[in-house]
Amino acid sequence: MRIGALKDNYGADQALFDTAVQRLWLALGAVALLAFPFAASDYWLYLACLVGIHIVSTTGLNILTGYTGLVSLGQAAFMGVGAYVVALAETRLGTPFLLNLLAAGLVTAAVGMVVGVPSLRVKGLYLAIATIAASFILHFVFQNWTAVTGGTRGLSIPPAQLFGLELARPFALYWVIAPLACIMVLAAANLFRTRIGRAFIAIRDRDISAEVLGIPLLRYKLMSFGLSSFYAGVAGGLWAYFFRVVTPESFPFVYSIFFLAAVIVGGMGTILGGILGAVFMTLVPEALKLVVGLLSPWMPNAVAMLSPVRTIVFGALIIGFLILEPHGLAEIWRRIRRFFHLWPFKT
Amino acid sequence: MEFDWLFFLEVTLAGLGSGALLALTALAFVLIYKATKVVNLAIGEMLMVGAYLFFSFAAGFGLPVWLAIPLALIGGGLLGAIVERTIIRPMLGESAISVFMVTIGLGSVLVGLVEIIWGAAPTQLPEFMGTTPLFIGDAYVSRKIAIGFAVASIVIAAFVLAFRFWRGGVALRATATDQGAAYSCGIDVPKVFSAAWIVAGVAAAGAGILVGAVGGISPTMGVFGLSALVVVIVGGLDSIAGALVGGLVVGLVEAWSGTFIGGEYKLLATFGLLILILMVRPYGLFGTVEIERL
């Protein structure tokens, strides 16, 4: 039960975590994140790492689509750029791990800004289609620039090294991915307390009005593309270290749809939505696998059905959320929270 | 090396043939966009369902072709109607992006359903067009592509005439211009929406049968819809003439780049064309330029 929160200055009003209860929960969450690798099995650690990577990428896409209103269907291709940059830096140059990730982010940001150039002339659906085109062109480059990308065979990457430790198993990588994901999500949350972030939101709400208010559209749209691709690039770099082999098929077009779906299912334009969406969309296929495993004694062809059922559920989730809960999981979460805030007074 | 004009001509004819199929698919797309302002990314998947329906009527139930084709077309129309009523109607008034995403989800659902019902392996449609090659002058043309071209042209011509003279076509154009005004003139706008989806479903199913007859069917044949997407962007989202011209242009570009540069460049050339058009003429060759006011 919360009666009210008194805020006596502007800073308090803008704070990301404004109540003591919230901070307590946050601390508990942090402890849970720290304790998780010691309690969980390898499979769950694998999932946790994958979820972390997806959270980074989804948050990036959320900056672009949820906050700036520019729909992109190229997020997976951008991740691919990051993954290839990491693979090349690791195998050809042997530069250190964190530097490679940074390089992946920066190179991808540059690519993303190039892809974003049409965003000045076209928007909405046309832009979405332009990013589809860009993602297919990038895919083509991955596949056919054999001298650099290794063609369809792809590139394999040695395990990451950090402070003399080898990060090969999910247990070790978790300690990199989880903090990095937390930092990047926090950075994104903070972004929207700054001029840049507010400019993004203004552009989303009405770009002509934003321009009238003195926001240079091209610069901010490109900045949004750059930031979003930076996240994708870092996520792709982590992906490369996690799976340790990068092929053109690793980043198919459906993967881009996956991220857009995660943003929608989670809730567009909320940081929490990006997290929830990424977690949910990553875990649903695993849950389906579990169900199929349980059903297989009674249904002999259950395993063969897994892939199409996953495709259907994927599509149905997008449709269902858009029709029934357009604000996504974040809105459901807010309703639950409000229920407990007002609990004995309003049920 | 001397340039082989005959070969070039044959490639060009093949390109025009597949361009006609693209134009037919694009027409289904434009129809929906014009009437309901929905960008239907699932058009490739609707086309695939049409092809699979024909496959099960003709090969599965062993029906004769003259019966299987209308049944498949009806099935396609039914699919369009169901989709419109259950998925698109509730999204009325939502932002264009949301509706666009819904159709992406729909495409995914359709692919999954087809894989469950018919399996994931690619198959061939039963032969129903004959294989005797045709010659135009000295140039060889595949019979299937020629028939596809002819059918697509006839259907497109019928559409153009219907838009011009048929009452329903006029109602559709009126709805496209101004929904409110159309409503006040006594046009049943929701019915127009349904009709547009049904007709588009039929057209997509027809295109699916033709495409499947040429290239075989598989759950991934919905990728054809991406080429159709390029066509409508090139031609303009709401222009029937644009769909025609765009279809032929994209068909030619695909055929030429696929033959003279290499098969893997086909998609690159198409999407390169798309980006070029978006940069130079964002609303396509014949599309209506949207003027934004504050």
Image (cartoon, coloured by chain):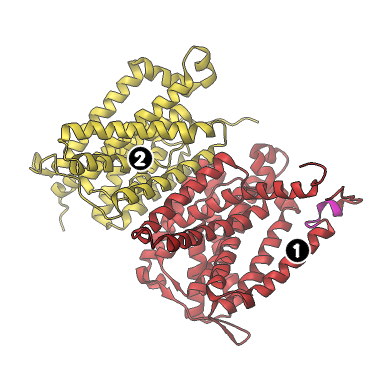
User: Image check: A45 left or right of A88?
Assistant: right
Residue B286 spot, x, y in % from top left: 41, 31
Q: Is residue A245 above or below residue B259?
A: below
Residue occupying the point 59% across, 79% down: A172
Q: Nearer the viewer, residue A14 or B56?
A: B56
Q: Is residue B244 visible?
A: no
Tell me the subunit letter for badge 2. Answer: B
Magenta stretch: give its range: A11-17
For residue A26, which numbered disc appears in the image?
A: 1
Q: Looking at the picture, which amino acid does disc 2 mark?
A: Met
Q: Nearer the viewer, residue A294 or B216?
A: A294
Residue extending farthest to the front is A298
Label 2 neighbour load within 10 Å: few <14, some 14-19, many 20+: many
Residue A69 spot, x, y in % from top left: 61, 45
Please name the residue that numbered disc 2 is placed on. Answer: B46
Chain in red in the render:
A
The quadrant holding residue B202 is top left
Tell me the subunit letter for badge 1. Answer: A
Instruction: Look at the image and tell me in which quarter the N terminus of chain B lies.
Output: bottom left
